[in-house]
Image: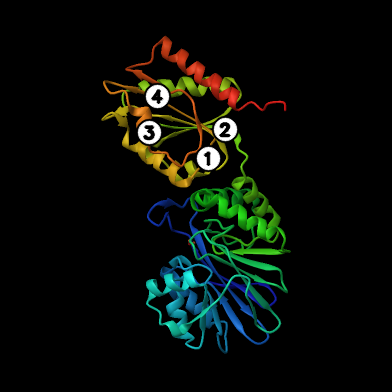
Amino acid sequence: MIVRELIPKVYSLSAIDWDRKLFDEMVPLHEGTSYNAYLVKGSEKTALIDTVHPSMTEGFIKALKGMDLQRLDYIVSNHAEPDHSGSIPAVLAEYPEAKVLANVKCRTLLKSSFNLPPEVFVLIKDNQVLSLGDKTLRFMWTPWVHWPDTTLTYIEEDRLLFTCDFLGAHLATSDLYADDKARVENAARVYYAEIMMPYRTNVNKHLDRLASMQIDMVAPGHGPVHQHPEAILSLYRKWAGDQTCPQVIIPYISMYDSTAKMVAYLVDRLMEKGLSVQPFNVVDLDSGRFASALAEASTLVFASPTVLNGPHPAMAYAAYLVNALRAKTRYAAVIGSYGWGTEMPQSLVDLLPNLKANWFAPVNIGGTPKAEDFAAIDRLVADILTANTPTAD
Ligand code: FEO
């Protein structure tokens, strides 16, 4: 790990995890990730903002010791999840004089994760300020981006905002700054969809709060630093806002090719109408790409054969993701094929209580699709097109 200066007396200590393929044994990482800590040297006090993943503690401590600190006064914990707090015990062992600054939720979580004694903590409250001499930290309690404890820390003099998970991206890169705009936007969108989308209401609330602040730089806990914060802030406003894009996402699976034929026909007809379509075979679903597609899409069509009078288990998993991620999709439908049981569409809808969509009539057919079944798909296409056509009012 190397130490890089962001602005005078503020340093980035980024543990770049080039090899990581899966986060939380669940989230695919297409380009690795990073765990970013920052050091702020005030004229009187020094504060460390977050730490790194436990697996990268050794290199982190070595880098910190290389900075020749006389003392470390504070460790600000913006978020207790161990990918940011995992090195706190090691830092305290090296700098026993340091106090851990955390809000009451964060303190509870840190205590239970690391068995830290109460005397190491100093509680912080929303909007509280702390002087480091010539630099002043302001703490903003911004719950649920990602856990209930999440906090943003702002250096008032430098107008620099440390955001931990918020506005972050899983991206292993040697770039300190988010100069590769397309690459960073793609990674940030996947990250938003997987981590932040379920908390869209909170995201919007916190974005409103940030709108009244002057922010010259955003330094997240994952991915590169934003020297032009409006770029990532405007993307978040778009993703988290209520507007959708006229896109049709089709998670599908087929066992004897009947549902596959229905999907192929549906995709062609939607494309003929000029709609954006993205099918996802859920047999080997990449949950990151799928979540990212859900971030703004207006319409979802679930296409599944019937298994034990319900959806195929792989489709049930896709539905679980849609429900858990609380996609803002406005329109939805179920299509599929059955042998003897006809209740798959309702079983699937029942898995999606969080999906606040208008449901079109299902197209659930016996066996292989016939002329009347394709005609039913034509009617579904017409419904989708009407729903996605802006009205002139
Ligand atoms: Fe990057 Fe919620 O931890």
The residue at the point 52 percent across, 59 percent down is 144
Question: Quick check: marks 1 and 4 in contact, CB under 8 Å?
Answer: no
Tell me where residue 210 sits by quadrant. Answer: bottom right
User: Can you tell which of label 4 and label 3 is closer to the viewer?
Assistant: 3
Q: What residue type is labelled 1?
A: Ala
Label 3 vs 2, first from the N-terminus: 2
Residue on which the image places disc 1: 293
| Disc 2 from disc 1: Cα separation | 9 Å
| Disc 1 from disc 4: Cα separation | 20 Å
| Disc 3 from disc 1: Cα separation | 20 Å
Helix, strand or loop status at disc 1: helix
Residue on which the image places disc 3: 348
The residue at the point 67 percent across, 50 percent down is 234
| Disc 3 from disc 2: Cα separation | 21 Å
Say which of 76 and 168 sits in front: 76
Label 1 vs 4, first from the N-terminus: 4
Mark 4, residues whose alpha carbon is within 10 Å: few (<14), some, or many (≥20)?
many
Q: What residue type is labelled 2?
A: Gln
238 shown above or below 303:
below
108 shown above or below 287:
below
Where does the image place residue 312, in percent across and percent down from the top left? 32, 33
Residue on which the image places disc 2: 247
